[in-house]
Amino acid sequence: MSIISKDIQKAIALLSNEELVAIPTETVYGLAGNIFSEKAIKSIFETKKRPFFNPLIVHLSSVDELETIVSEVPEKARILANAFWPGSLTLVLKKQKNIPNIITAGKDTVAVRVPNHPVTLELLRKLPFPLAAPSANPFNQISPTKPEHVERYFKNELKLVLDGGSCKNGIESTIIGFENGEPIIYRLGALALEDIEAVVGKVAVKNKKEENPDAPGMLDKHYSPSTFTVLTSDITSEIKKYPTKKIGVLAYNSSFTSDEIFTEIILSKTSNLHEAASKLYDSLHELDHLNLDIIIAEKLPEIGLGKSMNDRLQRAAFNN
Ligand code: TXA
Ligand code: MG
């Protein structure tokens, strides 16, 4: 029997009983539990096989709850929250004392956002506690953007994937921390850098592990298909390097169909970066289930969401 259902009452019952539920958001599906239940939070880490040094994002139903979670809100954080919540922006701020250390990996900051999905907003409004939710995938694997992706990963571990359809943004939230009141991007994501800068001015990006040891989730290899993956600006030459291999191509806007490739997916025939982002992970899931020898992904233009997608594809293609 499928664990995918729209039964919000069942989600409330499970979460209130310290169990986990996969929830839809506009970015990716999350693996959610009560932030104040040690049992639920431990079970998130165990289910994902996620190391405890990697902290979780707290999800709220409205910006009004922010002060119950964080102890300081710099002016630019306030401006960003008002501009983009509910939405695909996560803020890392000084935590309140009552936020359990297991959520924050012992740090004195906590990551928080108000997701923009009607089902999860309704769920959060009905629950008397916020939800911690990392992406609902095993550690380092491709994030889920459809309920079926979560079911495939966790059908033996979970009782419910709350069905909210396909995630319309399809890539994780943009994470912003603060140094001396100034915003710094820790993770590029579904909210484009340009949109953030339009509201608070120039923002530094410390998206790499070595640039920012404070963002422990930024691993070189992450978001990875199990199929060997390469990222290139020149698909045609890359294909020629693998004459005997079963190749899947993930292209941006144009077709490379030739006898040398087994299959191809085009992310956006109209060169729309939002459409491409919404299809990125679903396409990787699809290619990863075709028993290919290699996935050859095309680098996206380095603007807007193209930057965020290139970040994910670089990590997907990181081989050491
Ligand atoms: O779109 C999203 O953000 C999704 C949906 C479900 O909301 N969630 C998500 O969670 O992507 P997760 O756990 O896969 O990624 C959370 C990232 C990790 O890289 C983690 O290191 C970082 O947030 N993070 C959490 N708390 C932090 C903190 N206090 N300081 C710095 N980074 C933090
Ligand atoms: Mg994740």
Image (cartoon, grey):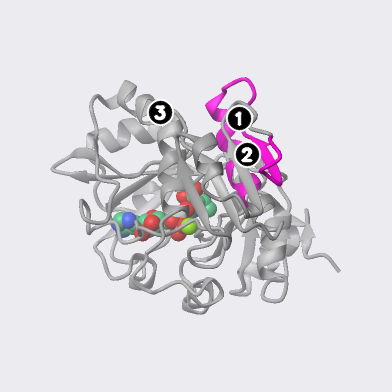
Spatial distance from mark 2 to mark 3, Cα to Cα? 26 Å
Q: Is residue 74 above or below residue 131?
A: above
Of 125 and 143, which appears nearest the observer?
Answer: 143
Tell me: 266 left or right of 41: right
- Chain part drawn in magenta: 258-284
Percent x, y of residue 264: 67, 40
The residue labelled by disc 3 is: 83
Q: Residue at x 60, y 45 (%)?
A: 121
The residue labelled by disc 2 is: 279
Ligand 1 picture quarter: bottom left
The residue labelled by disc 1 is: 275
- Circle 1: residue type: Glu
Upstream in the sequence, badge 2 or badge 3?
3
Q: Secondary structure at mark 2?
A: helix
Residue 130 in view (yes/no): no
**Residues at marks 2 and 1 touching, judged by CB atoms closer than 8 Å:** yes
